[in-house]
């Protein structure tokens, strides 16, 4: 893992209103504080619905919590007649640290392309927000044995022609679509195979230093019972956690994955 700080990002998806968000983040922060968690040892991030952001910001800033927060999507447009969209500058005003882009659900249900993801990465970097760029294969690609080239091609499109300054605001998340919310999970070896290929691709695209410093997460039915085994792999720097992140005690256990190492 070199000097890459582990990052555990909980994607709440379309769950929890702003009142529930406050209670969940409070409980997460209290649980981690009680365990004397060092947030510089492993980052804890919640990716919350847009309607929760102001409440979470007020809580985190007011109580000086170690938990960071982010958004689940963003518009590529700066402003204008784009009804229902949220701009990067709006997120920046709310102190957002991270933003997921290209999640498989956005790609599937909203037709998002690698080119659109690339535009969003650039927009986020311009405001100093780190993009969590999601890539991964559906089941039919996995069964055909084409999961590595499929994922690497998506990575190349999503991160095409970025500047060094933009790359500094990129985290990659490998999410095998067939393992999201299904209870199925790629084995640590499966995850390492693809994430290792992602790191090799980064080296070819942008050089060994970028490959060595860019954090790559695994996402797909991560739980406290399997996170330590996943994190033991050399190229895996954290997790993009779905359903388990809605339970603050369970998510705290995932953040503190080192407690589970045998």
Image: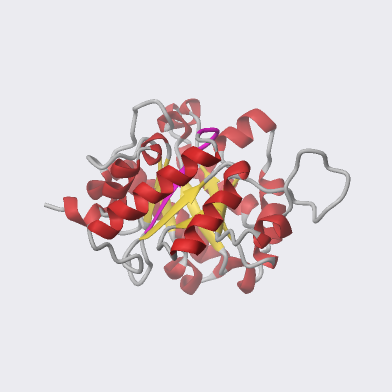
Q: Where residue 201 sits in the image (x, y, percent)?
A: 50, 58
Query: What residue is drawn where x is 44% and y is 65%?
Result: 64
Q: Where residue 41 sits in the image (x, y, percent)?
A: 31, 67
Q: Does residue 233 show up?
A: no
Hey, which quadrant is residue 243 in on the image? top left
Q: Nearer the viewer, residue 256 or 236?
A: 256
In magenta stretch: residue 118: no
Q: Nearer the viewer, residue 22 or 106?
A: 22
Query: What residue is drawn where x is 63% and y is 58%?
Result: 94
The coloring applied to the image is secondary structure
In magenta stretch: residue 9: yes
Q: Which residues are magenta?
A: 7-15
Residue 181 in the figure: left or right of residue 99: left
Q: Where residue 49 sits in the image (x, y, percent)?
A: 58, 41
Q: Across the whole image, how many numbered discs are drawn on residues?
A: 0
Hey, which quadrant is residue 176 in on the image? top left
Q: Where residue 123 sits in the image (x, y, percent)?
A: 71, 59
Query: What residue is drawn where x is 53% and y is 44%?
Result: 48
Query: What residue is drawn where x is 54% and y is 36%?
Result: 17
Residue 105 in the figure: left or right of residue 262: right
In the rendered image, the vertical position of residue 3 relative to residue 27, given as above or below: below
Residue 205 in the figure: left or right of residue 116: left
View extreme (left): residue: 262
In the rendered image, which quarter contains the N terminus? bottom left
Q: Does residue 166 show up?
A: yes
């Amino acid at each position: 893992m070199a000097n890459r700080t582990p990052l555990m990002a909980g994607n709440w998806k379309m769950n929890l209103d702003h009142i529930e968000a406050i209670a969940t983040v409070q409980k997460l922060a209290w649980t981690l504080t009680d365990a004397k968690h060092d947030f510089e040892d492993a980052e804890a991030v919640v990716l919350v619905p847009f309607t929760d952001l102001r409440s979470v910001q007020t809580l985190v800033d007011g109580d000086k919590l170690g938990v960071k927060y982010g958004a689940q999507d963003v518009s590529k447009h700066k402003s204008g007649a784009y009804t229902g969209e949220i701009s990067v500058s709006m997120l920046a005003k709310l102190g957002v640290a991270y933003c997921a882009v290209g999640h498989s659900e956005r790609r599937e249900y909203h037709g998002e392309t690698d080119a659109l993801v690339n535009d969003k990465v650039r927009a986020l970097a311009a405001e100093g927000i780190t993009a969590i760029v999601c890539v991964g294969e559906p089941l039919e690609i996995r069964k055909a044995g084409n999961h590595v080239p499929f994922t690497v091609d998506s990575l190349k499109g999503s991160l095409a022609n970025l500047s060094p300054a933009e790359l500094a605001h990129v985290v990659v998340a490998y999410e095998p679509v067939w393992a999201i919310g299904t209870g199925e999970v790629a084995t640590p070896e499966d995850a390492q195979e693809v994430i290792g290929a992602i790191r090799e691709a980064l080296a070819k695209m942008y050089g060994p230093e970028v490959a060595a410093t860019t954090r790559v997460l695994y996402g797909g039915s991560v739980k406290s019972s399997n996170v330590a085994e996943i994190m033991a792999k050399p190229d895996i720097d954290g997790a993009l956690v779905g359903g388990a992140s809605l339970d603050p005690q369970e998510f705290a256990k995932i953040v503190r994955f080192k407690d589970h190492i045998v």
